[in-house]
Image: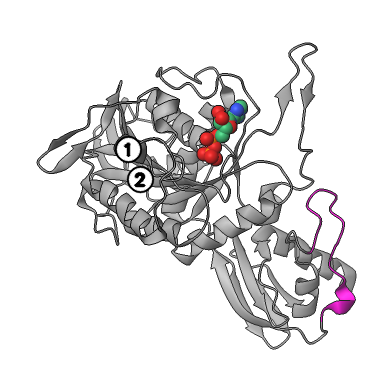
Amino acid sequence: MITEKDVLDSMRHIVDPDLGRDIVSLGFIKNLVIDGGRVRFTVELTTPACPVKETFRQRCTEAVMGLPGVESVDVTMGAMERKPRPGSEINTLESVDAVIAVSSCKGGVGKSTVAAHLARAMQRDGLAVGLLDADVYGPSTPTLFGIHHPHITMFQNKITPVNLDGLKVMSLGFLLGESPAVLRGPIVSNYIAQILRQTDWGKLDYLIIDMPPGTGDIQLTIVQQAALDGAIIVTTPQALSLVDVARGILMFEKVNVPVLGVVENMCSFTCGDCGAVHYPFGRSRSSLQERFGLPTLAELPIMPGVSDLSSKHAGADIAGFTQMSDQVHRAIGKSRVGAQERPQVTVAGNAIQVRWSDGYQAVLSAHDVRCACPCAVCVDEYTGAKLLDSSQVPLEVTVEAVQELGNYAVSFAWSDGHTTGIYSWEFLRALADREAGAAF
Ligand code: ADP
């Protein structure tokens, strides 16, 4: 007789590549029914948009079919029931599965272009997608999508978003005109909040918000009001861009919004004559993964024709956009399960103790950790040369505050006033390994 245990055990080798754990212990297998030789169950994924959905279905079917006595396997692919959006007072977002902000510290890095292509790429994945252009300083959606004088209609006191072959689009530019608005901060936040609240988004898999550039109060208000599921930071590989990324991470963490990753835009271009790839801004020495523990969701080159999204197929042939959409689905799934257990940090006097979830522990000296600070003030982000003069760091330096940053990193406020360092867990682990090696 086939037992529930046999069925579950047969699938324990199927590991979710993003969460690093098997789908049985993650609790993904639901509604298991064994009826003689017929087995049926649901695989409940973190998000309906999981890009490895079909692979899971196939692997589960094969695994269970391999059990003696099994005649047929019926696998339904489902997604976790979402709790009502916590903290959001906006009932138009009730039926939106995930709200994602696309943000940047500066204007002109391609934030709106990336947000629009992300929306189009997700739409091509068969998902219901909305795009809110909240960039009051330079709404670009009208230009990107070629919608200059839309006929905006209201129904039951709600604005109906413009429907572009299935993509629901709303822009401040539709209401305020396309030139940058000269409005004071609080009025801007109110405007955006009102549009969020009054647009009838209906049922969506994703709402992408193209944020105003910067990390100030306006942005914070939007983040809080929309109760975001995650944020994406767009940057270019120019000098100082890593400082911007750090600033963005710190803003979102203030309000507990996980940063899903970074899109590096306009990194390279391909010479039309010889086909050689050039990196006009140089290449950063260390990856964002090493610096902040954050994935790079896409590295996009400079591309001609990127700002015409009037067709649903715009950008379909650009691998970077498809990859970006896949990576966002995966990052959302990962942040929902939160399966990566965070290491624990304890500070006692001049010692910082870190305990990782695999049981590895290290006690690091606060002075060593401060001197190893990887921020762009302490280390040249291109050459990797150390800029911090360690002899200037007081030997008795201590940690005054610890802030955990999502699942990926931690930041310390030091007694010498330095606060800009973001230490990824991987970076701290490498530091601990180095110290352990030096001790022998
Ligand atoms: P932001 O929203 O950050 O202000 P935009 O998305 O409006 O930036 O982009 C600024 C300009 O750069 C636009 O003219 C846009 O077409 C162009 N652009 C953005 N990304 C790319 C790219 N990958 N290749 C070529 N041009 C780009």
**Residue depicted at 45% across the width and 32% down the height:** 116
Residue at 76% of width from left, 44% of height from top?
284
Mark seen at residue 205: 1
Q: Image quadrant of ligand 1?
A: top right
Callout 2 secondary element:
strand
| Mark sitting on residue 405 | none
What type is the residue that disc 1 sits on?
Asp
In this rendering, position of residue 387 left or right of residue 161? right
Pick the front one: 394 or 372: 394
Q: Please check the rendered image and state whether residue 28 is part of the magenta-colored stretch, yes or no.
A: no
Q: Is residue 365 above or below residue 235?
A: below
Residue 47 percent coordinates (x, y): 37, 41
Q: Is residue 241 visible?
A: yes
Q: Compare residues 143 and 389 and report the one nearer the observer.
A: 143
Q: Does the magenta portion include 379? A: yes
Q: Are marks 1 and 2 in contact (CB under 8 Å)?
A: yes
Give the vertical position of 402 relative to 129 (above or below).
below
Query: In this orientation, which residue lies closer to the viewer: 277 or 409?
Result: 277
First to last magenta residue range? 378-393
For mark 2, what is the residue? 98
Of callouts 1 and 2, the N-terminal one: 2
Q: Along the horizontal axis of the image, is 238 left or right of 60?
A: right
